[in-house]
Image (cartoon, grey):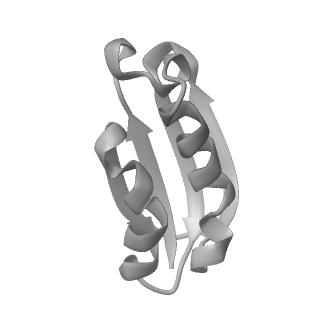
């Protein structure tokens, strides 16, 4: 299944300014494949502190496990999507 994941936070909780959360956020994204999540692309809007991830996983449980380390770092929206042909 394809998913659009939108990860957002505000300036006051931005992990870029946090010495421990920044590396954890980056490592979590780098390790999505270890949970069976295939990333097709990532897009960001730095001004809005929002990250968009188009990914593929066999189950929602895989996404839950993959994003578990950063669940408390902001708001995650997970939307199933499909390719229109």
- Height in image: 5 above or below 43? below
Q: Quadrant of residue 31?
A: bottom right
- Height in image: 70 above or below 49? below
In percent of width and height, residue 51 lies at: 52, 37
- Height in image: 59 above or below 15? below
In percent of width and height, residue 65 lies at: 42, 72
Q: Nearer the viewer, residue 62 or 3?
A: 62
Q: Quadrant of residue 32?
A: bottom right
Question: In which quadrant of the rendered image does the C terminus lie?
Answer: bottom right
What residue lies at 51% left-to-right and 16% top-to-bottom?
17
What residue lies at 38% left-to-right and 13% top-to-bottom?
11
Q: Nearer the viewer, residue 20 or 73?
A: 20
- Height in image: 23 above or below 85? above
Lateral position of residue 36 relative to residue 18, left or right: right
In the image, farthest residue toward the front: 20
In percent of width and height, residue 16 lies at: 55, 22
What residue lies at 43% left-to-right and 84% top-to-bottom?
59
Q: Nearer the viewer, residue 4 or 15?
A: 15
Lateral position of residue 7 relative to residue 75, left or right: right
- Number of numbered discs overlaid on the protein picture: 0
Lateral position of residue 77 relative to residue 53, left or right: left
What residue lies at 63% left-to-right and 50% top-to-bottom?
27
In percent of width and height, residue 80 lies at: 40, 68
Lateral position of residue 16 relative to residue 13, left or right: right
């Amino acid at each position: 299944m394809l998913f659009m994941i939108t990860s957002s936070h505000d300036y006051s909780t931005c992990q870029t300014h946090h010495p421990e959360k920044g590396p954890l956020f980056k490592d979590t994204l780098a390790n999505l494949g270890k949970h069976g999540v295939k990333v097709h692309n990532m897009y960001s809007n730095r001004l809005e502190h929002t990250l968009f991830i188009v990914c593929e996983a066999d189950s929602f449980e895989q996404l839950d496990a993959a994003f578990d380390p950063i669940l408390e770092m902001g708001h995650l929206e997970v939307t199933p999507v499909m390719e229109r042909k």
